[in-house]
Amino acid sequence: MFNIYILKSLKFGKYYIGSCEDITTRLKQHNTGKTKSTKRFMPWELVYKESFNTRSEAVKREQQLKSWKSRKALEKLIKEYF
């Protein structure tokens, strides 16, 4: 399975959208400073995820979410998730 995920910075309130196979491992990488683009906004929490059968499906959805450029749209999606 391949996943897309949205993380929220607990300190700054920023969102990060990504994709991976293993969300647990990837979240650890974000929270230990091993991901350059998210290092300065630690700590992160997982606030949303979706699973797909193929990497291409996951990457397509990741790009769709990134194209929204709207914090309100992301927050609406996250709210509907819970």
Image (spheres, helix red, strand yellow):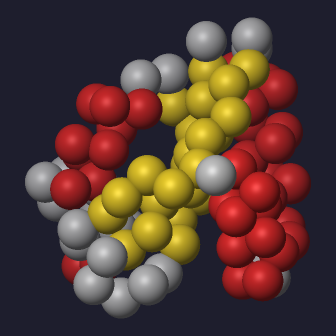
Residue in the picture at 37% in, 74% down: 9
**Quadrant for the N terminus in the image:** top right
In the picture shown, does residue 30 fall above or below 76? above
Image coordinates for residue 50, horizontal then vertical, percent: 68, 34
Kindly give the residue lying farthest to the front in the view shown.
Answer: 82
Say if 29 sits above or below 43 in the image: above
Task: Tell me where residue 59 sits by quadrant.
Answer: top right
In the image, 8: left or right of 40? right
Q: Which residue is rendered at x = 68% and y = 61% of the image? A: 78
Q: Residue furthest bottom?
A: 12
Residue 26: percent from left, percent from top? 34, 38
**Residue plotted at (22% across, 42% down):** 28
Q: Is residue 35 left or right of residue 4?
A: left
> Left or right: 67 with respect to 31?
right
Image coords of residue 6 (percent x, y): 56, 55
Residue at screen point 23% across, 71% down? 42
Please, is residue 35 above or below residue 58 in the view? below
- Whether residue 78 is visible, yes or no, is yes
Residue situated furthest left in the rendering: 32
Q: Position of residue 76 (x, y in %)?
A: 78, 70
Residue 39 visible in the displayed image: no
The part of the image, by quadrant, that contains residue 4 is top right
Q: How many marks?
A: 0
- Name above or below for residue 66 compared with residue 20: below
